[in-house]
Amino acid sequence: MLLWQKKETKMTILTGCWGGKKYEEALMAAEISQKNIKRHEVLDIGLAYITHLVEKEDYDNAARKCQKILGKNMKLWEDEVYRFKSIGQLKAISKYLPRGDLRLRPVIYEMILDEFLRTDYEGFATLIREWPGDLYNNKTIVKALKGHLSKEPNNRTLLEALAELHVYDQCYSKALEIYLTLRHKEVFELINKHNLFSCIKDKIVLLMDFDTEKAVDMLLDNEDKISIDKVVVELKERPELQHVYLHRLFKRDHHKGQMYHEKQISLYAEFDRPNLLPFLRDSTHCPLEKALEICLQRNFVEETVFLFKQNGEQSQGLADDYGGTT
């Protein structure tokens, strides 16, 4: 192409499209004709386009265009963030900020998090979940968050966000306290993932009140970390939970909790009579005399007859009196 033709092409792009406010077309044309237009001139068109969208109050579109136009230019990104701040539109640009190979200074992300913390708790919590924790100074955000919690100590959204921050900062016991208080569904995943069994030895009742089935499964799967004896002791004031745990243990292994089989007779009688007779049949560690005493006291006929049979022929007459054979 001749030199004058190149100049004419360049002038058409810059004056015809750009001058007519057709920024999208101008930008596309400039990108296609990059050999004829310098890089900084393409960037100028793009920046003008962003400005045009801001002036039209099309803030979301302006912020979205930043991704393509600003690329990996850190200074331009930070300039745009401060521009959006000056017009009260930090939220609009927040979802388009670079957080991959290019990272802005931590203060930029902290500024946006502070904006959300002051005006939109749900939005703040979303950013805490979605943004990598190393984008900002974790301690700075925790301090700011605790300031808001001092005014709203029971705000669930803020507490969940604080737990997320504690997990990133590896303060797992603090996160666990919050999740237990909130009865958060992720509490069991947190315990297993970060091996927090030493932190829950005095919180077994709380875990079982929250989700008995998950708690028992976790305890039985980790007997090497929290012993059977420890669990039984922790549940002594809650015999109904103690029964659930020992029953599930017995179903897994008839021998592991043998020292508690005598205790289980009373627990089955009180909370789970349908499973008492199967327990008496399957246990080889159950004291028959104690079992017979309890069943007689409660007038459990079927169980009493079975126990008489187990005691031998000398009890046959009594067994017959109680209803025959089993």
Image (spheres, rainbow, N blue to C red):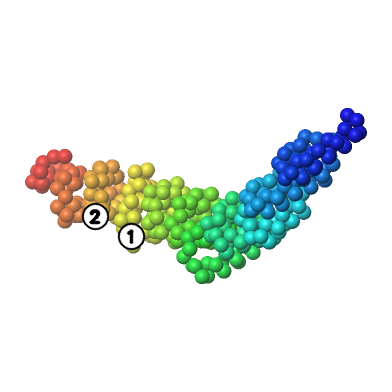
The circle drawn on residue 238 is 1
State the residue in front, 92 or 105.
92
State the residue in front, 208 or 274.
208
Q: Where is residue 222 in the image (x, y as percent from the top left)?
A: 46, 49
Q: Can residue 287 be seen in this view?
A: no
- Residue ID for mark 2: 270
Determine whether, in the image, residue 322 is placed left or right of residue 106: left
User: Number of labelled discs?
Assistant: 2
Q: Where is residue 113 in the image (x, y as percent from the top left)?
A: 62, 59
Q: Tell me the quarter of the image containing the C terminus.
A: top left
Determine whether, in the image, residue 209 is placed left or right of residue 69: left
* Badge 1 or badge 2: first in the primary sequence: 1
Q: Which residue lies furthest to the top in this view?
A: 1
Secondary structure under tag 2 reads helix
Q: Which residue lies furthest to the bottom in this view?
A: 151
Q: Give the amino acid at mark 2.
A: Glu
